[in-house]
Image: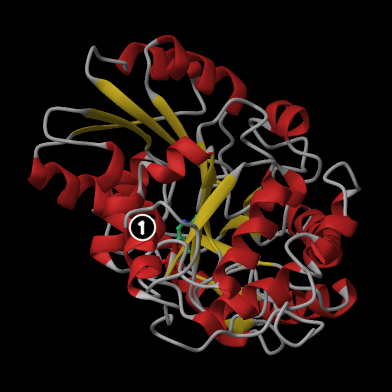
Amino acid sequence: MKKEMKFGTLCVHAGEAPDPSYGAHTTPIYQTSTFVFENAEQGAARFAGEEEGYTYMRIMPNSPTHAALVEKVAVLEGAETGQTFSSGMAAITAVALSQLEKGDHLLSSNVLYGSTYSLFSSILTKYGVEVSFVDTSDLEQVKNHIKKNTKMIFLETPANPTLIICDIAETSKMAKEIGALSIVDNTFATSYFQRALPLGADAVVHSSTKYIGGHADLLGGVVVGSKEFIKSMESIVNTTGATMGPLEAWLCIRGLKTLHLRMEKHACNAMAVAQFLEAHPKIEWVRYPGLTSHPQHEIAKKQMSGFGGMISFGIKGGIEAGRKLMNNVALCTLAVSLGAVDTLIQHPASMTHATIAREVRLKVGITDNMVRISVGVEDSEDIIADLDQALALT
Ligand SMILES: *Cc1c(COP(=O)(O)O)cnc(C)c1O
């Protein structure tokens, strides 16, 4: 299997090889906490990092199941290597704790997954990290907020839930100029539509709970980057122990085998749903990177090969109308999370982004009447018919 093969082939084949023990065709789930050494010398050599191999599942590289997943994600993202975690938040926390220390400045997007915002604003600051939240879709703002001690620029693009787009190449260039790291949360687009490392980012993080797993049946996170970057996370990974379970690693491997098929359908359906919503009289506004009405549609076209499956929109009649809509859908599932095969609908202000103070939310465009949809891979006609009937009752 060559790395220059096409994306779909890599989804199916990267990281996959018959198991050396018995020739199992699919990667076995190594359900074990510890690994047996042939002798005391080997155990010592593994712990000293002089011999490659496994020791204990909390310790990098965890297990052969984890290693297969890491290789698959790394190949798909164009990275040298990576590390898996028990959740997307565990992955982001490990990146922050391993790269930042007291006195460092973190410059972050002001629209972020709710828990990432809480981690940066309430936890990192407790340990003496300075944090600025800026509109990273505006390069001038990024430039104006860079400080002498800026150590990391963190982008979420497309951002959750406003779907704002940031210019990865330009921002990474600014980070490089000052010797800071640029980190991109690529959960929404996935490597199928957006590869941040070739654009200059130092590392990419994912909640593999979402499109990588793809079926709403696991929690997981992944970080990919250079060998040097992943190595720099080793002590935090090994000591904090937010280890992905082997079953979850296996489910992610299985999910990734159809990533290209699912993302294509998610995006195709999302475009149809976005166009339907944009034309509907009860809808105030629609935000989807594929619509020409999106404020950063041009940047999206430049750095993404497709626009993903996430849409947010404002409904006329405010929060009450939104509540009615969510209670009236029949096919769509009323649930947070995203990237599942079924269409999920939720209300950011009272659900995923409820931890953010209302003034802060409103300032960054997370309005009370915003509804977010993760468009699934059902037939688009049925999704649209469900939204149509629900809107008629709203
Ligand atoms: C869900 C999500 C996370 C957090 O991932 P978990 O697996 O839930 O911990 C981080 N970033 C984005 C963009 C997400 O959607």
Kindly identify the residue that appears in the image at 81 percent across and 40 percent down. Answer: 305
Give the camera-side residue of 183 and 344.
183
Q: Is residue 222 above or below residue 97?
A: below
Q: Quadrant of the C terminus?
A: bottom right
Q: Quadrant of the N terminus?
A: bottom right
Where does residue 296 sit, x and y in percent of width and height? 65, 30
Q: Is residue 115 above or below residue 337?
A: above
Q: Tally the marks.
A: 1
Where does residue 252 sit, x and y in percent of width and height? 63, 73
Residue 12 figure quarter:
bottom right
Kindly identify the residue that appears in the image at 37 percent across and 59 percent down. Answer: 45
Where does residue 193 sit, x and y in percent of width and height? 75, 46
Q: Is residue 46 above or below residue 388?
A: above
In the rendered structure, the answer to whether residue 107 lies left or right of residue 215 reads left
Whether residue 309 can be seen here: yes
- Residue pointed to by mark 1: 114
Where does residue 60 sit, x and y in percent of width and height? 42, 61
Kindly identify the residue that appears in the image at 61 percent across and 54 percent down. Answer: 188
In the rendered structure, the answer to whether residue 290 lies left or right of residue 337 reads right
Give the camera-side residue of 365 and 255.
255
Asked if disc 1 is less than 8 Å from ligand 1, the answer is no
